[in-house]
Amino acid sequence: MSIQNAISNRELLDQQERRESNARSYPRRIPLAISEAEGIYVTDMEGNKYLDCLAGAGTLALGHNHPAVIEAMEQVIRDKRPLHTLDITTPVKEEFVNELFSTLPEGFRDRAKIQFCGPTGGDAIEAALKLVKTATGRQSILTFQGGYHGATHGTMAISGNLGPKKNVQGLMPDTHFLPYPYTYRCPFGVGGEESHLISSQYIENLLDDPESGILPPAAMIFETVQGEGGSIPAPIEWIREMRRITEERGIPLIIDEVQTGIGRTGELFSFEHAGIVPDVFVLSKAIGGSLPLSVVIYDRDLDAWEPGAHIGTFRGNQMAMAAGTATLKFIKENRLVAHAGEMGERLLQSLQELQQEFPEIGDVRGRGLMVGVEIIDPAKPHSASGSQPADPDVASGIQRESFKRGLILEVGGRHGAVVRFLPPLIITREQVDEVVSIFREALIASLAE
Ligand SMILES: Cc1ncc(COP(=O)(O)O)c(C=O)c1O
């Protein structure tokens, strides 16, 4: 039974529009007020229920209000634990660090250090940049086209999307964008396997060329699956090559696991697919079990920064640490990482079947439960590597029509033409099938608009 609300979706949305910043984003595309939420479902003010495949932008590994998470938070209150402690330690924090460290790859576990940040993904990426700059005494950062690392000045500087950057002066200098192996829209115009081989070759050459124009870098940073860039998984072999190339040249490798981390891609940490270990990786979103938390985990050899080098008031959220511990334990005890891999494969395959039916689906791709469908205009000419121009209107039509049918999906990627699926890891087979069936109806409706 859902709560009877005295106020409607429309009234709350109108209030929001009147009072909140012009910079607000999601409510423009997902126009509802959420009254209640449980598991994969959210319910709006009028009792309409939606399958939530946005899940707090990939934050809610166990879905909304999971009993294990609620119990952990209630326990903190029952035990009269402090709720906020800056970075002063507590038993709740100790348990969180123990649980998290127990999941780290062997060999790295004993060398790992952790920095609590404050508490967004963007802040933790900022910390990681400061860490490697301090440790190496260098300033250049190598990053990738299509990467997304946050909305602060530093993280925006190393992110690809020009939209938010173009009106903001004074971003972090000395950032260098490299071609990401986006095989559908291959930066080298070849596509397929060759695309990532050329990318590795290009990067290796750049780093060894004494006239490359780039000073020896403080780090290379990337997502193994670009999220906001359009759910683009880097080929496993390319990830290994990046590790080899950086290791051979003493360049710290930072993997941004903010969206991919904690089981989403079918491994607990997405770099595990490639069997590599980065020097630094960053976790946020799912690690706080629905609450704000972010950390940088790194090799102790880089621990050269001084006391207070990365401070911030809200680095001691005990509820988030308890919720994070509960999430990690639940994932382990219930084989949710493997489940995410299986459900992701089912989703991917079903969407690939739809691709045979609809020429508007240019590409279906993903890793685990981080899946994207790139919508194109099949009437337009092919590029040299076989892709066709993006069709953002049909993509946003799919989002609108899905919403009308009770499914929340995100749209992003290049030109806003990638429909993105980021469901909680607890999604069932039946729910995957329902998501695909609604997506199909929404695609038909969007094409008829
Ligand atoms: C890969 C990646 N890095 C960093 C961030 C920034 O995290 P936050 O929005 O918490 O600052 C995001 C957010 O979507 C992300 O997807």
Image: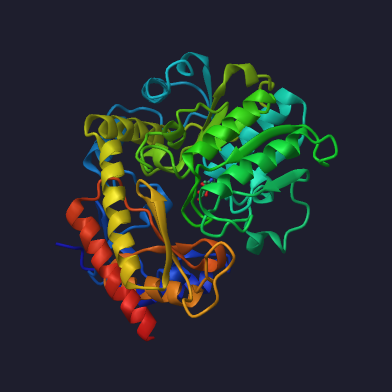
Q: State the image quarter where residue 338 is shown.
A: top left
Q: For the view shown, which residue lies furthest in the left direction?
A: 1
The residue drawn where x is 36% and y is 85% is: 448
Q: How is the image coloured?
A: rainbow
Q: State the image quarter where residue 36 is shown.
A: bottom left
Pinpoint residue 285: horizontal percent, then vertical percent. 44, 43
Q: Is residue 15 above or below residue 238?
A: below
Residue 313 in view: no
50 lies left or right of 22: left
Pinpoint residue 297: horizontal percent, then vertical percent. 52, 27
Q: Is residue 303 above or below residue 65?
A: above
Residue 410 in view: yes
- Work out whether residue 157 or residue 351 is closer to the camera in this orientation and state it: 351
The residue drawn where x is 22% and y is 34% is: 334
Q: For the view shown, which residue lies furthest in the bottom direction?
A: 449
Pinpoint residue 335: horizontal percent, then vertical percent. 24, 34
Q: Is residue 359 above or below residue 326?
A: below
Pinpoint residue 408: horizontal percent, then vertical percent. 34, 64
311 lies left or right of 8: right
The residue drawn where x is 69% and y is 48% is: 177
- Looking at the rendering, in which quadrant would you find the N terminus? bottom left
The residue drawn where x is 37% and y is 63% is: 409
- Work out whether residue 245 or residue 329 is closer to the camera in this orientation and state it: 245
Please state the total of marks drawn on the protein image: 0
